[in-house]
Image (cartoon, rainbow, N blue to C red):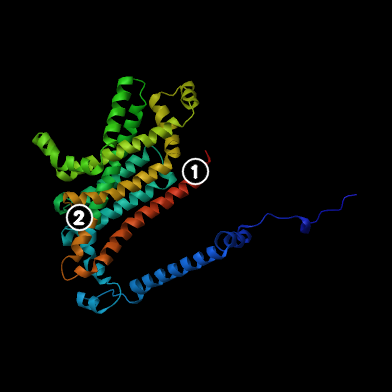
Amino acid sequence: MKAETTLTDIELPPTQQAKFIPDLRRDYFSTTGRSLVTLVCLALIAYLVWSFIDWALLRSVWAGTPEDCHKASGACWAVVTDRYRLILFGLYPYEEQWRSALACLAILATVVLSCIPLFWSARLLPIIWLAGYGTFYYLMKGGIFGLPIILETQWGGLALTTFVFSSTFVIGMPLAIILALLRRSKLPVISSLTALFIDGVRSLPLLSILFTAAIILPFALPDFLVGDKLYRVILGSALFFAVYQAEILRSGIQSLPAGQEEAAAALGLNYWQTISRIILPQAFRLALPPTINQVVIAFMETSLIVILGFFEVTASGNAAFTAGGWNSFFAEVYFFVALIYFTFTFSLSRYGAYLERSLKVSSR
């Protein structure tokens, strides 16, 4: 007769906490040499962290003049508090900078709304982005509701970076969808020409495309098609984004089972209904990780326009410390600018990771 099994006799699987200490000991302290390397690395990390805290917080100066900062031995955040308007708004008129701030908030609200699943539809997302982008543009440009007109040459700082990025996304994403669908066309001529166009643009560095749009195109186009240099650069950036995103979407579409389109045809759906309701939603889901990565890259690449003479956030940061006696405190300004880029990219990457988990993208 078998003895009864009690709860105390059952071996429960080890918890994550119970496994942590043995794994830590095995990976970092299993031998004398490994333990020594671990302790040295921990001591070095602790030293660097403490040195940064001491420099950035404990001995820092948050308000004052350049002379006050020279007397201190820590970071001079006074240059940021004194010149933050120049960094964020560039050459935008001082008395109208509230418009630039509201415009950036409009784009931020647009991005936040786009991240809410409730608004994920083929109708709502374009409306949200067109409304947010239009609000941004007319707040910056003016000319309506009694707002004075501010020329694009006076735009700068974070607002200009936001404008270039949002324009690249608004123009580039629909163009990417069109290119991806044309690449999959059943007509060999269309698919071949589209493939040639995509591969041709992808073979060029972004900087050469921006230089071509800014400098060479005015000599090749008639005067009525030249337009402002800023918009030509945006079109070049959007085109570069579109060709890479088109290949990402095409890979997502090709990974779908062939039966999806056959089932849609059996249900009586036409081509556009099949694409908009069945193919593209699933393709975007499968292509989510590289799409998030491409959006992050597009935001980071906006800094390249400084080479073309635009006063974006990096250039405005550079101007913030080159005058007024702040020349010695460039590290603090660049740290602040880097923090702006980091905040956006880190937030977007964390949101992308959340979507991957919630949509179970990697489980496919």
Residue 51 higher or lower than 223, as above or below: below
* x and y, in percent, of residue 265 in the image: 46, 22
Q: On the image, numbered disc 2 is attached to which residue?
A: 156
Outermost residue on the bottom side: it is 71
First-in-chain label (2 vs 1): 2
> Dot 2: within a 10 Å radius of its alpha carbon, few (fewer than 14), some, or many (20 or more) residues?
many
Outermost residue on the front side: it is 33
Instruction: Residue 50: tell me if it is visible.
Output: yes
Residue 123 higher or lower than 303, as above or below: above
Asked which quadrant contains residue 277, the reply is top left
Circles 2, 1 touching at the beta carbon (< 8 Å): no
* x and y, in percent, of residue 241 in the image: 30, 40
Name the residue: 15% across, 67% down: 323
Instruction: Residue 150: tell me if it is visible.
Output: no
Q: Nearer the viewer, residue 32 or 211?
A: 32
* x and y, in percent, of residue 18 in the image: 63, 61
Please tell me the numbered disc located at residue 181.
none
Disc 2 secondary structure class: loop
* x and y, in percent, of residue 355 in the image: 46, 46
Q: Is residue 228 left or right of residue 171?
A: left
Residue type at tag 1: Leu
Q: CA distance from mark 2 to mark 1?
A: 38 Å
Q: Nearer the viewer, residue 208 or 351?
A: 208
Disc 1 secondary structure class: helix
Name the residue: 18% across, 54% down: 311
Q: Is residue 311 left or right of residue 193?
A: left
Q: On the image, numbered disc 1 is attached to which residue?
A: 359
> Dot 1: within a 10 Å radius of its alpha carbon, few (fewer than 14), some, or many (20 or more) residues?
few
Q: Is residue 13 left or right of residue 170?
A: right
Residue type at tag 2: Gly
